[in-house]
Amino acid sequence: MVAPTIWIMAGEASGDVLGGRLIAALRRQRPDLLFRGIGGVRMTEQGLESLFPMRELAVMGLVEILPRVRSLARRLDMAVADITRTRPDLVVTIDSPGFALRLLKRISGLGIPRVHYVAPQVWAWREHRVREYPGLWERLLCLLPFEPAFFRRHGLEARFVGHPVLQSGADTGNAVRFRAAHGLDPAAPVLVLMPGSRRSEVPRLLPVFGRTLSLLAARIPGLVPVVVASPVVAETVLRATRDWPVQPIIVTELHDKHDAFAAAGAALTKSGTSTLELALAGVPMAVTYRVNPMTAAIARRLIQVPHVAMVNLLAGRQLVPELLQQDCRPDRLAETVETLLTDTEAAGAQREGFRTVLTSLSIGEEAPADAAAREILELLYQIGGNAPGE
């Protein structure tokens, strides 16, 4: 029997992490599987040879994407051509709906079963787009517990497989190790700064973070800033922080990030999955974001949810402060972060809320990546008859 091939793609750092875990889980359940596609460091660690560098797809924003349209179109053509030529047994796309859903549509006539992992967040904005989805995939895998009911209302089946943040290890860091590795006083207050993983977003947030730090350094003696940077933006972060009033520790490795979480008294982060990582680690946080003003104006008209931070959406209330666009100002950010670093009651209230949020993300004993792999293999066997021994 010829080993089945799964063509799998991710378009940004968070999807690459999911892809790496998913490939490992698939191999545990079906060791003979072969993989092709597009991925970053985590997926290549699992043996994937990326068709082209994943970083070429990592862009966000309605306006920010315009200069990249031609380049993205060429990469889409390359992906379609590769799938058409190699005829894999199944295609898995991970998040990155702008690219992934176009890819799924382009290959719809090939008769290859398709799985989309990480449901498009049309429940948050542009709900009308759900009308475009019938026929794009054979199976949709969701990370959030309320998503299957949303898609069901629109006549689409979707399956909740648990949120991969539960496998992230964000709660396994060692504060003592982090302080020893960087020569920090055991009592020094540590602030984690998470400006994002995309080259399009980091330059907007880092200058604000730097000015915020100037204010905080005067109010909180000995404050140690730690910037978490993905490999994609590490050089950008290094250059942008050289003139900061307090030189930050820059961490790029996963274990260093988790150790920093364990040592942190608070965090200032962009919206996104990072809020769930921090919640798992029990780090009180403030959430901020800033995009092109035109993008923001369009988004305000389209957003249909009361909160931007995922941790707030799952809590059903503003558990953590959200300081977005015009509120993404050094004075506001410094005031909010100072409260989290100095007010034990405020910090404790967040930690208490995190426990409820994290419980809602679990499907029981099965790890999210294993649940996703099980769904994918079930589809592979159901459509292709590729169960072991067949």
Image: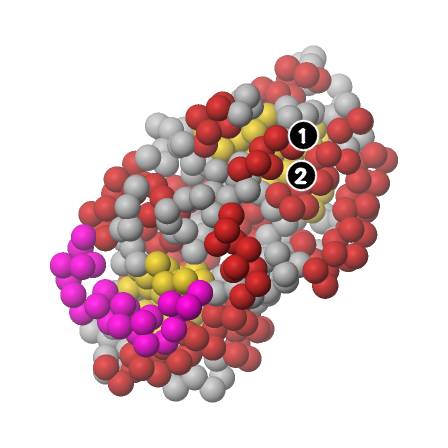
Residue 245 counted in the magenta span: no
Residue position for label 1:
136
Q: Is residue 284 above or below residue 280?
A: below
On the image, which quarter does residue 110 sit in?
top right
Q: Magenta: predominant secondary structure element?
A: helix
- On the image, the x and y values in percent for residue 157 come to 54, 22
Residue 335 counted in the magenta span: yes
Q: Which of marks 2 and 1 precedes in the sequence?
A: 2
Residue at 33 percent of width and 48 percent of height: 312
Viewer-side residue, 134 vs 212: 134
Viewer-side residue, 372 vs 174: 372
Q: Tag 1: residue type?
A: Leu
How far is disc 1 from disc 2 in space, using C-alphas? 7 Å
The residue most toward the front is 301
- On the image, the x and y values in percent for residue 254 come to 46, 57
Residue position for label 2:
101
Residue at 61 percent of width and 30 percent of height: 131
Circle 1 sits in a helix, a strand or a loop, which is it?
loop
